[in-house]
């Protein structure tokens, strides 16, 4: 800063302060008022997400005598409990992949139909179904396709026994079926904007340049939809991987799933003094979900860039 500039700053301060600092204060106040509505959300997130997550992370490295240890993680990754992690990954992957394929097909069919009323009905229904879960959802399926469910009995009357093979509502295949009830609608909600964002001008330009339909989807359509599909798949995987109530009601803990094992250990229903092992398994789940959701957020931002164009 030159001598003249310093003199100007001093003169401005004598007259009522430096305008640069006034401008900065105005910007800070404007920023505060613009985001002041989010303060309750941040407080809520800190209390009900931040503090429990921190507690799980700390207690995962605490022993029964409150000493620091890695024994909880060693037990959590042992043969007894590691199978529950694998089981949850398999359940999440199977339900997510199946739901993603079916949901993408529905989204594409609704988008190209051009029927606004159908699109509104599908959007509304998907929003309701995607948020249905837990104990009510388990009860719906038990009443419908359980051993003595209405649909099961109706099918038996026409000679179809859905339980004649390996299928059971209270096993792995049954859980996948139940999870598809909310996985498919969630896929429709997430991927429909991406499919609708594909412009007809791109197809027309590709045809004018001599591209066939298969070439258009190979070089334009599929590359554009791949980030949206992959991100939605990761979201569905995290959704199924962390689900607890529905699986707990249907399987009663007979399937080795990570959320059920955590619940049993934290409640002390299986082995006493193993609460911190449950915390270590909870830390496993937090890491898996965090990595998965991080991938989804990255791919969603990547997809939103071309949707805005």
Image: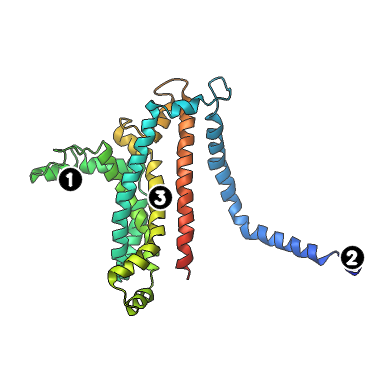
Mark 3: few/some/many CA within 10 Å (<14, 14-19, 20+): many
User: Where's residue 208, x and y in %?
Assistant: 34, 80
The earlier-in-sequence mark between 3 and 2 is 2
In screen coordinates, is 4 left or right of 288?
A: right
Residue at the (39%, 28%) spot, across then down: 81
Cα separation, mark 3 vs mark 1, equals 32 Å
Q: Quadrant of residue 227?
A: bottom left
Residue at (37, 77) in percent of width and height: 205
Sequence-wise, which precedes: disc 1 or disc 2? 2
Under tag 3, what secondary structure? helix
Alpha-carbon distance for marks 3 and 2?
A: 57 Å
Image point (35%, 55%), residue name = 187
Q: Quadrant of residue 307?
A: bottom left
Q: Residues within 10 Å of mark 1 (few under 14, many from 20)?
A: some
Q: Secondary structure at mark 2?
A: helix
Q: What residue is pinned by disc 3?
A: 234
Relative placement, left or right, of 149 versus 35 is: left
The label number, if any, that marks residue 6 in the structure image = 2
**Above/below status of 271 relative to 237:** above
Kindly identify the residue that appears in the image at 49 percent across and 35 percent down. Answer: 283
The answer to whether marks 3 and 1 mark residues whose Cβ atoms lie closer than 8 Å is no
- Residue 135 location (% of width, % of height): 34, 40
Q: Name the mark on residue 151.
A: 1
């Amino acid at each position: 800063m030159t001598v003249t500039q310093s003199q100007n700053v001093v003169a401005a301060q004598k007259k009522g302060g430096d305008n640069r600092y006034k401008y900065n204060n105005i910007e800070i106040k404007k920023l505060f008022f613009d985001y002041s509505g989010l303060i309750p959300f941040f407080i809520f997130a800190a209390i009900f997400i931040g503090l429990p997550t921190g507690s799980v992370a700390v207690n995962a490295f605490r022993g029964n005598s409150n000493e620091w240890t890695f024994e909880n993680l060693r037990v959590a990754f042992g043969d007894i409990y590691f199978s529950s992690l694998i089981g949850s990954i398999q359940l999440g992957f199977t339900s997510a992949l199946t739901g993603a394929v079916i949901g993408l097909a529905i989204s594409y069919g609704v988008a190209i139909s051009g029927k606004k009323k159908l699109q509104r009905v599908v959007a509304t229904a998907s929003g309701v179904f995607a948020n249905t879960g837990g104990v009510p959802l388990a009860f719906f399926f038990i009443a419908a396709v359980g051993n003595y469910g209405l649909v099961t009995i109706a099918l038996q009357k026409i000679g179809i026994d859905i339980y004649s093979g390996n299928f059971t509502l209270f096993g792995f295949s049954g859980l996948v079926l139940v999870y598809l009830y909310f996985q498919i609608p969630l896929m429709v909600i997430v991927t429909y904007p991406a499919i609708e964002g594909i412009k007809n001008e791109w197809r027309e330009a590709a045809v004018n340049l001599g591209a066939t339909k298969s070439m258009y989807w190979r070089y334009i359509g599929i590359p554009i939809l791949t980030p949206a599909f992959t991100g939605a798949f990761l979201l569905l995987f995290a959704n199924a991987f962390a689900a607890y109530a529905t699986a707990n009601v249907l399987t009663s803990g007979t399937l080795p799933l990570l959320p059920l094992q955590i619940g049993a250990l934290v409640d002390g229903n299986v082995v006493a003094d193993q609460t911190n092992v449950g915390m270590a398994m909870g830390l496993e789940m937090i890491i898996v979900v965090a990595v998965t959701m991080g991938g989804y957020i990255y791919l969603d931002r990547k997809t939103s860039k071309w949707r805005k164009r």
